[in-house]
């Protein structure tokens, strides 16, 4: 009997300036917080298993050109 192919995934890590606000926004799109979230790093997922990770952006990100 053959083994099934391993599941491959792609997870975006999105830097944001306001983690709480970003988490609320993505909740409207069906994402909820998952175990393992930290103060400056949030793990979000949908009921279907899609994942999105949010991280606190470094000061000055994104850089703005004058």
Image (cartoon, rainbow, N blue to C red):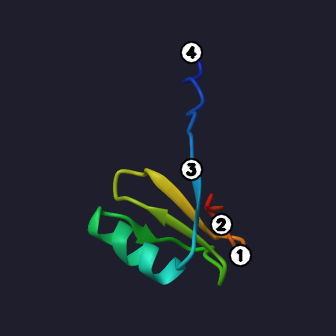
Q: Earlier in the sequence, mark 4 or mark 2?
A: 4
Q: Residues within 10 Å of mark 2 (few under 14, many from 20)?
A: few
Q: Are marks 2 and 1 in contact (CB under 8 Å)?
A: yes
Picture coordinates of residue 39, whole percent (x, y)? 65, 84
Distance Cα–Cα, label 3 vs label 2: 17 Å
Q: Which residue is mark 1?
A: 59
Distance Cα–Cα, label 1 vs label 4: 54 Å
Distance Cα–Cα, label 3 vs label 4: 35 Å
Quadrant assignment, res 64: bottom right
Q: Nearer the viewer, residue 28 or 2?
A: 28
**Secondary element at tag 2:** loop
Residue at the front extreme of this rendering:
66
Q: Which of the image's four quarters has the C terminus?
A: bottom right
56 on left or right of 16: right
Q: Is residue 3 above or below residue 48?
A: above
Q: Earlier in the sequence, mark 3 or mark 1?
A: 3
Q: Which of the image's four quarters has the N terminus?
A: top right
Residue 1: mark in rendering: 4
Q: Earlier in the sequence, mark 1 or mark 4?
A: 4
Residue at the right extreme of this rendering:
58
Residue 12: mark in rendering: 3
Q: How many marks?
A: 4
Residue 61: mark in rendering: 2
Q: Nearer the viewer, residue 7 or 41?
A: 41
**Secondary element at tag 3:** strand
Picture coordinates of residue 46, whole percent (x, y)? 37, 59
Q: Earlier in the sequence, mark 3 or mark 4?
A: 4
Q: Is residue 26 above or below residue 50?
A: below
Residue 36: mark in rendering: none
Q: Residue at x 58, y 15 (%)?
A: 2
Residue at the top extreme of this rendering:
1
Q: Residues within 10 Å of mark 1 (few under 14, many from 20)?
A: few
């Amino acid at each position: 009997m053959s083994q099934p192919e391993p599941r491959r995934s792609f997870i975006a890590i999105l830097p944001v300036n306001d983690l709480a606000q970003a988490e609320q926004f993505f909740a409207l799109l069906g994402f909820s917080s998952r175990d393992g979230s930290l103060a400056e790093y949030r793990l979000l997922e949908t009921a279907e298993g899609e994942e999105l990770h949010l991280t606190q952006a470094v000061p000055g990100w994104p850089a703005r050109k004058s």
